[in-house]
Amino acid sequence: MKKWAILIGLSASLLGGCAATELAGQAIRSGIKDIEFNVTNGYNIQNFTNSKIAISTNTGKEVDGGMAALAMLTGRKVSNTPSQATNNVYTDMIMTEFLKKGYDTRSISDSFNAANPNDLNNYKKQGYQIVMKGNLKVESSTSAWGSMTGGNYAYSGVKEFTLKGIDTNSGKIIFIVTGSYGNPKDAKDVAKDIADAFSKKING
């Protein structure tokens, strides 16, 4: 009987150690954030400090559980191609964070083609100097911590993103912002990261 008690105790310790290791690993990965802001040669980003900005994002076609992630985010079944409504949610989140920073911003709800001079000219006529066109990669993941604390074991968020700033006057790319995370991150937090990176760069 004593031998069984010892074996059970050792097993519990090993399991506890594995759980602690997993939690520590998730904590480290959740803190990993790699964001780069690169300005195209020949442009002075400070010249766009007071620019009006139009924003459009696309979640694209996801792989490796991305469709399941989108379904979790929207609360409904999602096809192989995410709806425009889903894209607009992300766009609005980013727009909101830019508004908080004091930038005159609007979201682009219609189809926008940066290669089409008419599309760029349309926003130029409205006084927008920059059109931001972005792509977000949504992924699902699991959280041992969430499970242990009564939260969700599975969650979803943005794993990577790219965002291009296009000059409506010339059609050229002014800057590119890219980001990746150790674990998928809440879309609202990602939107804040993007706005912070832009504000920090443009204000020198």
Image (spheres, rainbow, N blue to C red):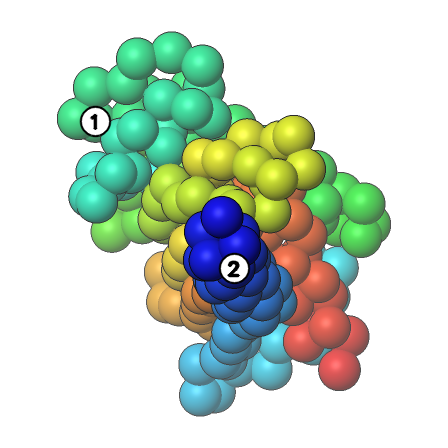
- How busy is the neighbourhood of tag 1: few (under 14 within 10 Å), some, or many (20 plus)? few
**Which tag, 1 or 2, sits closer to the chain's start?**
2
Q: Can residue 109 be seen in this view?
A: no
Which is more toward the observer, 128 or 187? 187
Query: In this rendering, is residue 188 above or below 84?
Result: below
The amino acid type, in three-letter code, at marker 1 is Thr
Residue 138 in the image: x percent, y percent?
37, 43
Query: In this rendering, is residue 110 above or below 44?
Result: above
Apparent side of residue 143 relative to residue 117 in the rendered image (left or right) = right
Under circle 1, the secondary element is loop
Which residue lies at the image location 53% right of the left edge and 55% below the top edge? 2
Under circle 2, the secondary element is helix
| Residue corresponding to mark 1 | 81
Apparent side of residue 49 relative to residue 32 in the rendered image (left or right) = right
> Which quadrant, please, contains the C terminus?
bottom right
Which is more toward the observer, 88 or 125? 88
Which residue lies at the image location 49% right of the left edge and 48% below the top edge? 1
| Residue corresponding to mark 2 | 6
Q: How far apart are marks 1 and 2 (CA)?
A: 54 Å
Which residue lies at the image location 43% right of the left edge and 44% below the top edge? 142
Q: Is residue 139 visible?
A: yes
Tell me whether the residue at label 1 lies in contact with that at label 2, contact meaning CB atoms closer than 8 angstroms.
Answer: no
Apparent side of residue 181 relative to residue 151 in the rendered image (left or right) = left
Apparent side of residue 204 relative to residue 83 in the rendered image (left or right) = right
The total number of labels drawn is 2
